[in-house]
Amino acid sequence: MRWLLAYEFPKTRGLGASRVWYDFGQALEGLGHDVEHFTADQAFPDGLQGRIRPLLRVPLFAKALKEYLEKHPDQYDVVDCHLGVFPKRPEVLSPNTLIATRSVGLFDIYKEVLATLPSENKFGPLSVVERAVDIWRASARRSQFGASDLVNVPNSEEVERLSRDGCSMPVVHFPYGISEREIKAVPKETIETQPPRLIFLGMWCYRKGKHDIRDAFLKIIEQVPEAQLELLGVSRPENEILAEFPESARGNISVTSRFEPDQLFQKIDGSAVALFPSYAEGFGIAVIEQLLSGIPVFAYNIGGPADILNGLPYAALFERGDKLALANSVINYLKMPEKNRDEIRTACRKHALSFQWESIAADTAEAYQRIRSADPSAV
């Protein structure tokens, strides 16, 4: 099939959302499909200059995508696009073109969760423009459901939410995955370093549970005082992050604000445990990457992490916000006999291999083709 993957971010593996389409597209190409990307690189070749235009990224991208498809009405069998960028189907677009709306984190769930957390907005209340764009995006998302042929979501929580909200179009549920290249990049032999190293991989923010990580780690070092915490890819200066911890714990903490994606498996190699107390998460590819390295992940029972970690042979999932239970489970794991920890690490590696892009892309293409052919057995 001929695919257009459309999303309002640059085409790169360095951004979480972009990486979904980037890796999905590569897997499709490996299966013999023709794949093109329409991204911020095409929509905004000169960038988004000024103070207002960056705030208008989504509506401006939606306009550019519509104009592009009007110029190429018969070129694609499938347009797989981010939720919110396709509010209306162009009249000239071929009726044989399947429009697949993809969620990389359902906005309504994120919005509800974020409303319960402290604001990350350093600049005070939203401006008039920001409020207007927020209203436009909500309207565009509702309209896109009507303009699409299906919705593709990455976790079962979103399936249930769309069903509860009365979504009338077909909903398919496919996870994200790892590539053969990543599998080969994992060190063949991993020896857990001493003292035990706990890691967090991701942005340092309230949604990702930054203070839950802090409080859980403080509880952990009460029982395992030699434990170290390494914060990776947090996109914040070390001094700012360390200031959020009591001075007595700072000697146990190291921070790597940024690193290249191909350095990941070397960075996390030998870690004992991964903390992932995110409050809202579409999927959480970092969870699979850490499992692939034989690192048990401890997370809240939400979204993608709930689907990924369910069924592993250790207490991995906890109610959102229950940082004490998470910390106690980590302590119990660190105090297990080495033989038991080895068994868990082996189970983590094996489980991660069930999430591979090649099979996920093949299953996705098959489901899309069935819906495109009006076969109701697709869902």
Image (tube, rainbow, N blue to C red):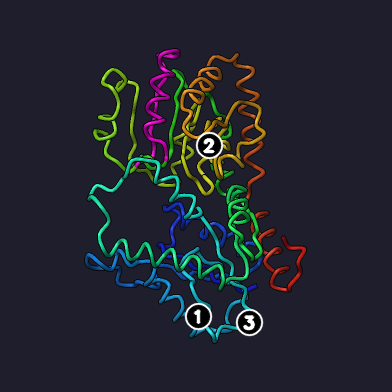
Is 114 left, or right, of 80 in this rendering?
left
Which part of the image, by quadrant, shows the C terminus? bottom right
Q: Does the magenta stretch include residue 228?
A: yes
Task: Give the residue type at disc 1.
Answer: Leu
* Residue 131 place in picture, x, y as percent: 31, 61
Q: Is mark 3 on a helix, strand or loop?
A: loop
Secondary structure, mark 2, is helix
In front here: 77 or 136?
Answer: 136
Of marks 1 and 3, which one's residue comes earlier in the chain?
1
Q: Which residue is drawn at 30% across and 21% down?
A: 251
Q: Give the residue at x 45% y 48%.
A: 112
How far separated are the C-alphas under marks 3 and 2?
42 Å
Residue 358, given in percent of the width and then of the height, sits at: 65, 55
Residue in front for this viewpoint, 164 or 219: 164
Q: Which mark is residue 290?
A: 2
**Magenta span of residues:** 208-234
Residue 95 is labelled as 3
Task: State how far apart marks 2 and 1 are (Cα).
Answer: 39 Å
Identify the amino acid type marked 2. Answer: Gln
